[in-house]
Amino acid sequence: MSCDRTETVLHAYFDQELDPVGAAEFERHLDQCPECTESLTALRSLRSSITGAPLYQKAPAPLQNKILAELRSSRPTVFPRRSTTNWLAMAAALLLFAIVGWQFLVAHRATDKELVLAAAVVDAHLRSLQPGHLTDVLSTDQHTVKPWFDGKLDFAPPVRDFADRGFPLQGGRLDVVQGRTVAALVYGRRKHEISVFIWPTTETDATPRFGSHQGYQWISWRKGGMEFYTVSDTAASDLEQLQQLFSKL
Amino acid sequence: MSNLVQEKSSDVLDSQDRLRFEMLVLPHLDAAFNLARWLVRGGADAEDVAQEAVLRSYRFFPGFHGGDVRAWLLQIVRNTCYTWLEKNRRNQNMAEFDEELHPNQSPSPEAIAIAGNNRERLTQALESLPPRVREVIVLRELEGCSYKEIAAITSIPIGTVMSTLSRARRQLQSALANPAPKEAHHEL
C-alpha cells in the first residue's frame, strides 16, 4: 500500500468510517508504516486540542425562549393577514375561535387522562429497568418471543425484530398497566432500552401523540385494535423511527 | 360551513405538529447555533440566523417524514447561513478589514503553553478557512457527524467530504504548529 494513496483512508480509519475488514487491513499497514503511524498520532493530538479548546458554541439560553414564543404565537395557516377588513371573515373567525376553544377544552380533558396513563406506562418502564426485570423471555428471535406470549395473554401482540433497522429485539415480558395485563417488548437502541407496551382496544386508530414524563419520552398510537405505548430515555427521534416501523407492519 | 370544519381540524393538527416539532427539532438547537456561529462567524448574527433557520424549518416541518432530524435541520441552517453570507458579503469584507486594524494582542510565551491560547489559534485558523471547508470540519469535529451525515447536510459527495477533511485538518495542524498566525502579512 502506497502512503500517497492512503491519505483519505488514514482519515477514514481515524474517523472510524472504515468497515471492519478495511480497518483490520489498515491496522496491518500501520504496523509497517511509521509515516502513517505518525500522521495518526498527529490527528489524535489535533482532535484533543479541538476538544480541549473547547470550540463548541452552545445556543444562548434566551434563543430557545424566543423561538418558543414565536412558535406559540404564530398561526399562519389559520389566520392569514389581510390588508382590508373583511367583516364576514371576522365573523367566521369569531365562530371558529369559539369552536376551536371548545375543541381545545375537550382535547385537554382527554389529554389529562392520557397523561395519567402515560405516567403509568413510564412507571412500568422504570420498574423494568430494575436489575433482572427487563425481560421474562430473553431472546432476540421474534419466533421465540411471539409464542411465549401465547396462553399468557388473550390477544396476540405483533412481535417483530427490527435489528436490521437499528432496533434489535431483546426480549419480552408481561406487565401490568393500570390494572390491565399488557405485552411489553424490549428493544435496544445504542445503549438505551426501549419498552413497547401493547394491549387491545376497542377504539379506532389514532395518529401518534408525543409527550415526556420524568425525563422519559413516550409516543402513543392506536392501530388495528391495539394500543401502543413506546417509552425510553433515548432521543425522541429514535422513538419516532420505531413508531414508524411498527405502523408499517 | 364545511370550510370552517376543515380549517378547524387543520388547527388541531397544528398544535400536535407544534408539540412534535418542539420535541423533535428543538433539542438540536445547540447544533443549529454552533453551525451558524462558525459559518457566519459572529455570536449575535448566529443567533439571528439560527432563529430564522429554526422558524423556517417549522414551516417545512409538515414535509419532514422521519429520518435524521439533526441532519435535516442542519441542512436548513446551512442554507440560511449561505443566504445570509451572500447578503452580507460587503459588510463581511469590512469586518475582515477591521480585524487588520485591530491585530490580536501578541500572546506571551507563557500563554502559548496554556490551552486558552490553543483555543484562540484554532478559532482564528477555523475562521480563516473557506466556509465550504470550515463547515465540514465543524460538522465532523464539533458536531460528531458521520461522513454520510456531512454529505447529506452539505450536498457534497462523500469523496469530497473526505478530501476536504484532510485539507482542513492539515491547515489546522499548521496553524497550531506556527506560533505567529499573522506571519503572512510581512510579505505584503
Image: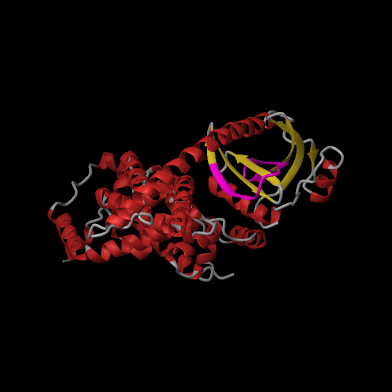
Q: Residue furthest left?
A: B101
Q: Quadrant of the N terminus of chain B?
A: bottom left
Up-down relation of residue B149 to residue A168 (above or below): below
Total labels: the figure holds 0
Residue A196 is inside the magenta segment: yes
Whether residue B178 is visible to the viewer of this picture, yes or no, is: no
Side of A75 where A185 appears, left or right: right
Kindly indicate the quadrant of the structure image that contains residue A69: top left
Q: Main secondary structure of the magenta part?
A: strand
**In the image, what residue occupies the spot 72% across and 47% down?**
A169
Q: Nearer the viewer, residue A163 or A232?
A: A232
Whether residue B47 is visible to the viewer of this picture, yes or no, is: yes
Residue B67 is inside the magenta segment: no
Side of A246 where A100 appears, left or right: left
Find the magenta span and give its range.
Answer: A187-210
Q: Nearer the viewer, residue A91 or A80?
A: A91
x, y (%) of residue B86? Answer: 26, 66
Q: Nearer the viewer, residue B158 or A73?
A: A73
x, y (%) of residue A160? Answer: 74, 51
x, y (%) of residue A236? Answer: 54, 45
**In the image, what residue occupies the spot 52% across and 56% down?**
B68
Q: Nearer the viewer, residue B160 or A230?
A: A230
Q: Quadrant of the C terminus of chain B?
A: bottom left
Q: In this figure, which colouring scheme has been used for the structure?
A: secondary structure
**In the image, what residue occupies the spot 51% across and 66% down?**
A8
x, y (%) of residue A85? Answer: 23, 57
Side of B161 where A30 appears, left or right: right
